[in-house]
Image (cartoon, helix red, strand yellow):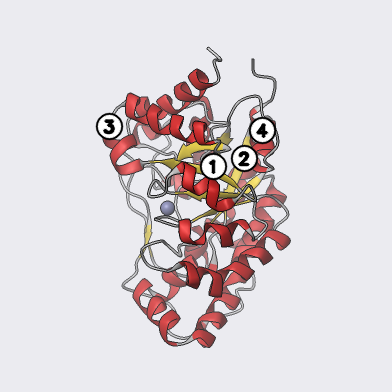
Amino acid sequence: METMTSRERVMAALRREPVDRTPLVNPTSLATVELMDLVDAPFPEANRVPEVMARLASTGHTELGFDSIMPVFSIIQESSAIGCKIQWEQKDNWPTVKMTEPIYESPDDIPNFDGWLEHPDAQCVLEAIKILRAQFPDVAIIGKTMGPWSLAYHTFGVERFLLLSLDDEAATRKVLEKLKRLTIEYGVAQAEAGADAITLPDHATGDLVSGEYYKRYLQDMHHEFAEEIPIPIILHICGRTVDRMAYIAATGMAAFHYDSKNEPDESMEAVGGKISLVGNVNNPTTLYAKGAEDVKQEVQKNLEAGVQMVGPECAIPLQTPIESLRAIREAVVEFHGLN
Ligand SMILES: [Zn+2]
């Protein structure tokens, strides 16, 4: 029997406390074209108009049975607010930063960012969180603030920033130090708007950056985020990350959103009970292309390993069928014998 509200369940799982059943949590986007059509909330409006953003986000709870609602479908809200050029796209594509037109070349180009939170693309998320908080008092509302490593990709271009990180440690640190203000300010503002927890994507991705790089450049800064942002943080890094999970677990962040390139068992072992795990259900193959039975098997593997929250590994493809997403809940209900 269910004895907790969705919100209580998610908050307990983030603290690794007992729950009545494993919560379904989406630290990243659950938006699909089907869901956009269902509630008349298409991209690009759902990325720019607070009411539309909130309406699309709420389908994760109302249609798919997730215990969380996460309204930030893209990774570009802050980057737009500080002046990056954005390709806004239509409902079949996420908006992206135009990487061919980076806005900074050296750390000295980075300004103070005074007043950046007033930009409509920054405000949109804050307003959407306020709407959702009022409408869903018993559901966990999750925000999103981009980490400085990701913001550096957007503002310098991926290649230029990765080269800098190999060539010039001092300059790299200067970039991260300057950009981290955005991460902290947006996190604090979303907490004040009513978010219960916040996803912090910082794309020191498995295939681009080594575990030692994570330790050198990001571990201390992530610890600082856990101190400065007053709600639980869910770190998101794609790819194979077992080599840095012990470092991540030591930051004081609440959870790590992990990729299907890592097995649930080895990941639980790597974090040693110091951080909760969420994610792992494969997007491009399983959720997008396979059927409900394969989805259930992956969820079950997580439940058997004792992973604290289940959900997709990353933002799901926009063409993912609703039936595959509903299978996540079915697997949890079956595992806990709740039918
Ligand atoms: Zn990802």
Q: Which mark is residue 290?
A: 3
Query: Which element carries disc 3, helix, strand or loop?
Result: loop
Q: Disc 2 designates what residue?
A: 141
Q: Residues within 10 Å of mark 3 (few under 14, many from 20)?
A: some
The amino acid type, in three-letter code, at marker 4 is: Arg
Q: What x and y, as percent, mark residue 339?
A: 52, 12
Please state the horizontal and vertical placement of residue 318, each as a whole percent of the image: 34, 41
Asked if disc 3 is less than 8 Å from ligand 1, the answer is: no
SS for callout 2:
strand
Marks 2/3: CA distance? Answer: 29 Å
Query: Disc 2 marks which amino acid?
Result: Ile
Say which residue appears at 44% left-offset and 33% top-offset: 301
Find the distance from the CA under tag 1 to the CA under tag 3.
25 Å
- The residue that mark 1 highlights is 70
Q: Is tag 4's residue or tag 3's residue first in the polypeptide sequence?
A: 4
Spatial distance from mark 4 to mark 2, Cα to Cα? 8 Å
Question: Badges 2 and 1: C-beta atoms under 8 Å apart?
Answer: yes
Respond yes or no on whether mark 2 lies under 8 Å from ligand 1. no
- The correct choice, above or below, for 205 with respect to 262 in the image is below
For the residues labelled 2 and 3, say whether their Cβ atoms are less than 8 Å apart: no
- Which residue is painted at 37% across and 67% down in the image? 208
Front disc: 2 or 3? 3
Q: Is residue 195 above or below residue 178?
A: above
Return the disc, 1 or 3, that comes first in the chain's sequence. 1
Instruction: Estimate how packed mark 4 is, as few (under 14), some (14 to 19) or many (20 or more) residues with alpha carbons within 10 Å.
Output: many
Residue that numbered label 4 is attached to: 7
Q: CA distance from mark 2 to mark 1?
A: 6 Å
46 on left or right of 8 = left
Task: First in sequence, mark 4 or 2: give its number.
Answer: 4
What is the spatial separation of the Cα atoms under label 1 and label 4, in whole angstroms?
Answer: 13 Å
| Amino acid on which disc 3 is placed | Lys
